[in-house]
Amino acid sequence: MQNKILSHEQIQHKVRRIAYQIYEANVTETEIIIAGIDGGGLNFAKKIQKVLQNITDANVLLCKVSMNKHNPLESGVKTSIEEKDYTNKSIVLVDDVLNSGTTLIYGVLHFLKTPVKQLKTAVLVNRNHKKYPVKADYKGISLSTSLQEHIEVAFKPKNDAVYLT
């Protein structure tokens, strides 16, 4: 059984709110890197990037972050832009759901190998089941769920939704 947690309109509102929060934290920056973790995180990052481009004169660069989510240590983390392009820049690492924190912590670790001006994290859904000391600086919604429950984020044209299953 699926319970809809967020509707398309609610997700659009959360995307706008997060984009404005990112803008406010980076108002003096000339470039902001929005680094989306491949999959739902990248889709969420694209939505944030689109709103940011409409509210700031800064160059908003999208970066795809790729890793094996089941074994990020073995596979390593790869980015679609070169290290020199995010060195000393403001970066926001984006994922759709923060569950255990594994994906986010390995993404953070990757970017911390390079000097950056600022590194923040953004998620649409924060589940509060962390096994690593990582937090979402910007979050759409926080849910207290059981470990048996699953969050499904569906990014579909004009029909985005978040479900609890």
Image (cartoon, rainbow, N blue to C red):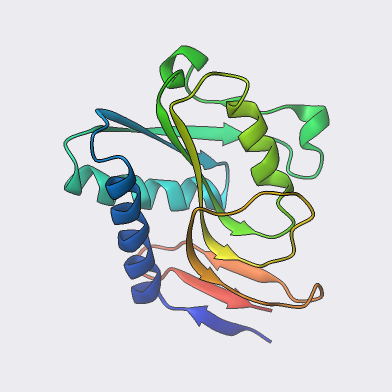
Q: How many labels does the image show?
A: 0
Q: Is residue 129 above or below residue 48?
A: below
- Tell me the quadrant of the picture where the N terminus can be found: bottom right
| Front-lying residue, 58 or 29 | 29
Q: Which residue is drawn at 68% across and 42% down?
A: 105
| Front-lying residue, 35 or 142 | 142
Q: In this view, does 114 lie above or below 58?
A: above
Q: Position of residue 137 (x, y in %)?
A: 50, 53
Looking at the image, residue 163 sits to the left or right of residue 63; the answer is right
| Front-lying residue, 68 or 25 | 25
Q: In this view, does 139 lie above or below 84?
A: below
Q: Where is residue 101 in the image (x, y as percent from the top left)?
A: 70, 51
Q: Position of residue 76 (x, y in %)?
A: 73, 27
Q: Position of residue 44 (x, y in %)?
A: 45, 53
Q: Residue at x 70, y 37 (%)?
A: 106
| Front-lying residue, 162 or 146 | 146
- Tell me the quadrant of the picture where the C terminus can be found: bottom right
Looking at the image, residue 48 sits to the left or right of residue 93; the answer is left
Q: Residue at x 74, y 64 (%)?
A: 129
Place residue 72 in its image quadrant: top right
Q: Residue at x 32, y 69 (%)?
A: 13
Looking at the image, residue 58 sits to the left or right of residue 130; the answer is left
Place residue 160 in its image quadrant: bottom left
Seen as rendered, the residue at the extreme top is 84
